[in-house]
Image (spheres, rainbow, N blue to C red):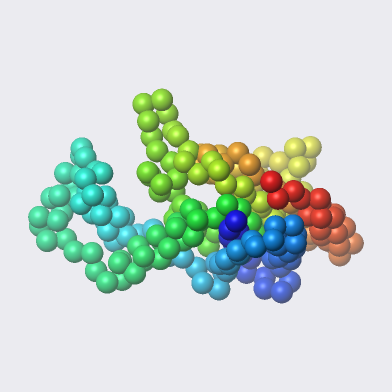
Amino acid sequence: MKLLQIDSSISGAQSVSRRLSASIVTRFKDSLPGLVVSYRDLAAEPVPHQSPATRFAKLKSLYEAGALVGEVGEMVAAAMQSGAQVDASAQREVAATNGALNEFLAADIVVIGAPMYNFGIPSQLKAWIDCLAAPGKTFSYTTAGVEGLAGSKKVIVASARGGFYAASSPMASMDHQETFLTSFFGFIGIANITFVRAEGVNTGPEQRQRAVESALAEITLLKAA
Ligand SMILES: Cc1cc2nc3c(=O)[nH]c(=O)nc-3n(C[C@H](O)[C@H](O)[C@H](O)COP(=O)(O)O)c2cc1C
């Protein structure tokens, strides 16, 4: 079995989400002998953002594989005919994007350290998620609608937030962190998503300690299956 651990906090050793994601991984290592763990620190080594050059490179490879028809296919063919090139830096960026996607596809369990930044997720984590949104690999559009292709995976999110966003909180509608992650992974077919949450960590040291201890206690009850 393979587990992929992702961290994205910029707060280093002070990070709550990093502490929780590490604890989740330890829990799974203890309960799943032989578990193979790979790790990506998006704050230390961000994946590239999508760009016009990487978009063209991806469309070109889809076109060459015969997987791109219609208007977009014609646009790519015209650009190629007029000499548009995929330069070395775009090739490197596409390789990095595909590397992140393949690592995700290979994993059975994905543990994501996801702080709330400005009501959403860190931009480094969003750039990684952009790598996963791959037609034909993680989702496809059919005449019946969207089909998620990554449904066999389990995702556990270590969520940390300065304030409170539970349904009963006046701030609930400003949560675009957990709601976004639920929507995205649902879109690619993953219904098995669990949030381990430390809330209100910036409202005072006592609440921070309480929130972290409560999340760590929850982690001891996590089931691998
Ligand atoms: C850049 C930045 C933006 C933040 N934005 C929010 C926010 O919108 N809402 C909130 O409740 N807390 C916010 N916080 C507080 C973090 O969610 C909190 O510190 C949490 O512990 C971050 O996770 P980490 O400790 O793993 O870095 C922000 C913190 C930073 C550094």
Exactly how many numbered labels are in the figure? Answer: 0
Residue that sits furthest to the front in the current view: 34
Q: Residue furthest right?
A: 206
Residue at x 31% of width, y 71% of height: 89
The image shows residue 102 at horizontal and vertical percentages of: 44, 58
Residue 173 sits above or below residue 59 on the image: above
Q: Which quadrant: the N terminus?
A: bottom right
Above or below — where is 19 with respect to 58? below
Quadrant of res 216: bottom right
Q: Looking at the image, can residue 199 be seen? A: no
Residue 198 falls in image quadrant: bottom right
Q: Nearer the viewer, residue 109 or 101?
A: 109
Q: Where is residue 68 in the image (x, y as percent from the top left)?
A: 24, 43
Give the x, y percent position of residue 130: 45, 53
What is the quadrant of residue 9 in the picture?
bottom right
**Residue occupying image coordinates x 69% and y 61%:** 33
Return the residue found at the far left. Answer: 81
Foreground residue among 202 and 61: 61
What residue lies at 45% left-to-right and 56% top-to-bottom?
101
Q: Is residue 96 at all visible to an observer of this figure?
A: yes
Nearer-the-camera pick, 39 or 69: 39
Q: Percent from the top left, x then y, of residue 7?
A: 61, 64
Measuring 66% from the left and 52% from the top, which residue is drawn there? 157
